[in-house]
Image (cartoon, rainbow, N blue to C red):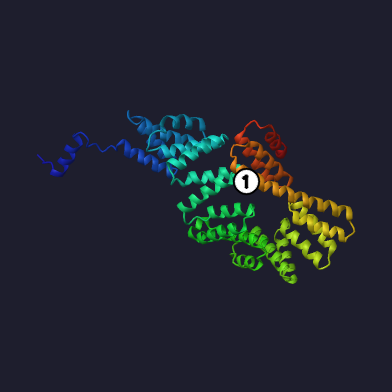
């Protein structure tokens, strides 16, 4: 008779003893399921869910995996039915709240999405996804102060991500707070090389150059634009060359300005700034008809640019077109007034996050300025507050035609 080895006997005895089964515990299985969700291995998630479903004390774990499976196929009702039952479990509350946010956003229930995100930002202050989503929602709603607050939080949580400071620079630029915009853009540039997946240095430098040009610091603008990489996209190169032409023109470097603006227009003939600079340059070197053609095209491409209409009125007056010159100057004055109101209402919108009427008015101004994308965003923001707002609904129907 062959004797059993001590090692084999130990294994056999262990398998017969309670608690020595090789089957993973519910908690281990659940952790494996969560890892499969992160790696988006949905067949594995489904297999683990089926194993857990056979266990009596694994209802919460099973429903959580089911909720994620339904989210993957965009079945929001099934997701919410499960999240509503299991969200109180501390292990998964954070993930359940984020699932609920995605569901609310998908069905355009933006107030519920924002309330849930604000709860998340308090309960889980280090959840960077919650802060990023709040930035997007508040920015779309025109609540820019709140957006800035969450930008600052993301900036502290993700020190290599340039996007929060870039957005704060953009917001500051829109409000003509140029010094603050420069501060944020420079901070974004420090962070840009930190994470290659978020390398936005070329875009940031171009936006920063625009701020410097507004402040008439042309040499600083040139310094930023000269540092653009050779891999910058063609639209960005066209914008950069138009800005460089603007700087050269302001510094009296007419030959450089002409070369750069022609290059910009060659790269992108639909770029309003390139046509504007060509018009101003042409007027200064005595090519009045060419100036008129360029500025009329710029006005068509960017109907909310008061600078274009001011320069166009000057050209038309030189050509003896007094009536058309008066019309262009009137449009210039109208745009200036609208922009001042736009800024004032943006401040009020930031203070009154539940005021749909302000957002409708801002949308109407954006529409008059020719910024249809912004108009749609503001009208949609109004509907997020008041889903039955007739003015916003009518405006969106009109813009969709």
Labels in figure, total = 1
Examine the rendering and report whether any part of residue 164 can be seen: yes
Q: Is residue 132 left or right of residue 219?
A: left
Q: Is residue 254 left or right of residue 150?
A: right
Q: Quadrant of residue 293?
A: bottom right
Q: Is residue 399 left or right of residue 355?
A: right
Q: Residue 113 appears at what percent x and percent y?
A: 53, 37
Residue at the farthest left position: 1
Residue found at x 50% / y 55% = 161
Task: Judge whether 276 appears above or below 386 on screen.
Answer: below
Looking at the rendered image, the quarter that the N terminus falls into is top left
Examine the rendering and report whether any part of residue 200 can be seen: no
Residue found at x 66% / y 46% = 344
Q: Residue 225 appears at what percent x and percent y?
A: 62, 65
Q: Nearer the viewer, residue 46 or 101?
A: 101
Residue position for label 1: 347
Q: Residue 121 appears at what percent x and percent y?
A: 46, 42
Looking at the rendered image, the quarter that the C terminus falls into is top right
Residue found at x 64% / y 52% = 174
Looking at the rendered structure, the secondary structure element under dot 1 is: helix
Q: Quadrant of residue 88?
A: top left
**Number of residues whose C-alpha sits closer than 10 Å to that of mark 1, classed few (under 14), some (14–19) or many (20 or more):** some
Q: Nearer the viewer, residue 254 or 229?
A: 254
């Amino acid at each position: 008779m062959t004797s059993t080895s001590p090692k084999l006997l130990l294994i056999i005895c262990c398998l017969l003893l309670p608690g020595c089964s090789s089957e993973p515990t519910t908690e281990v299985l659940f952790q494996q399921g969560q890892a499969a969700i992160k790696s988006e291995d949905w067949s594995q998630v489904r297999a683990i869910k089926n194993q857990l479903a056979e266990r009596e004390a694994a209802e919460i774990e099973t429903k959580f995996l089911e909720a994620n499976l339904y989210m993957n196929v965009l079945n929001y009702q099934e997701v919410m039915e499960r999240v509503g039952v299991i969200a109180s479990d501390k292990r998964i509350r954070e993930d359940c709240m984020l699932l609920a946010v995605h569901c609310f956003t998908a069905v355009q229930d933006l107030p519920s999405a924002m309330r849930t995100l604000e709860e998340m930002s308090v309960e889980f202050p280090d959840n960077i996804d919650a802060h990023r989503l709040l930035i997007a929602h508040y920015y779309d709603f025109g609540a820019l102060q709140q957006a800035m607050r969450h930008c600052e939080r993301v900036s502290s949580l993700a020190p290599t991500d340039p996007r929060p400071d870039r957005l704060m620079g953009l917001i500051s630029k829109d409000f003509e707070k140029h010094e603050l915009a420069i501060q944020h853009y420079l901070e974004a540039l420090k962070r840009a090389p930190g994470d290659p997946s978020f390398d936005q240095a070329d875009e940031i430098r171009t936006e920063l150059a625009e701020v410097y040009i507004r402040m008439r610091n042309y040499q600083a603008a040139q310094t930023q634009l000269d540092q653009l990489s050779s891999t910058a996209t063609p639209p960005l190169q066209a914008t950069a060359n138009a800005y460089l032409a603007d700087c050269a023109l302001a510094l009296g470097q007419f030959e450089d300005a002409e070369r750069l603006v022609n290059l910009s227009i060659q790269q992108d003939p639909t770029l309003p700034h390139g046509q504007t600079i060509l018009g101003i340059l042409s007027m200064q070197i005595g090519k009045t008809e060419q100036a008129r053609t360029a500025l009329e095209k710029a006005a068509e491409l960017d109907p909310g640019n008061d600078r274009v209409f001011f320069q166009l009125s000057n050209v038309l007056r030189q050509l003896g077109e007094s009536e058309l010159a008066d019309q262009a100057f009137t449009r210039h004055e109208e745009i200036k007034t609208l922009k001042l109101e736009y800024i004032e209402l943006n401040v009020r919108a930031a203070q009154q996050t539940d005021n749909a009427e302000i957002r409708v008015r801002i949308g109407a101004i954006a529409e008059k300025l020719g910024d249809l994308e912004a108009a749609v965003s503001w009208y949609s923001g109004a509907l997020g507050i008041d889903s039955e707002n007739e003015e916003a609904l009518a405006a969106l129907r009109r813009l969709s035609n």
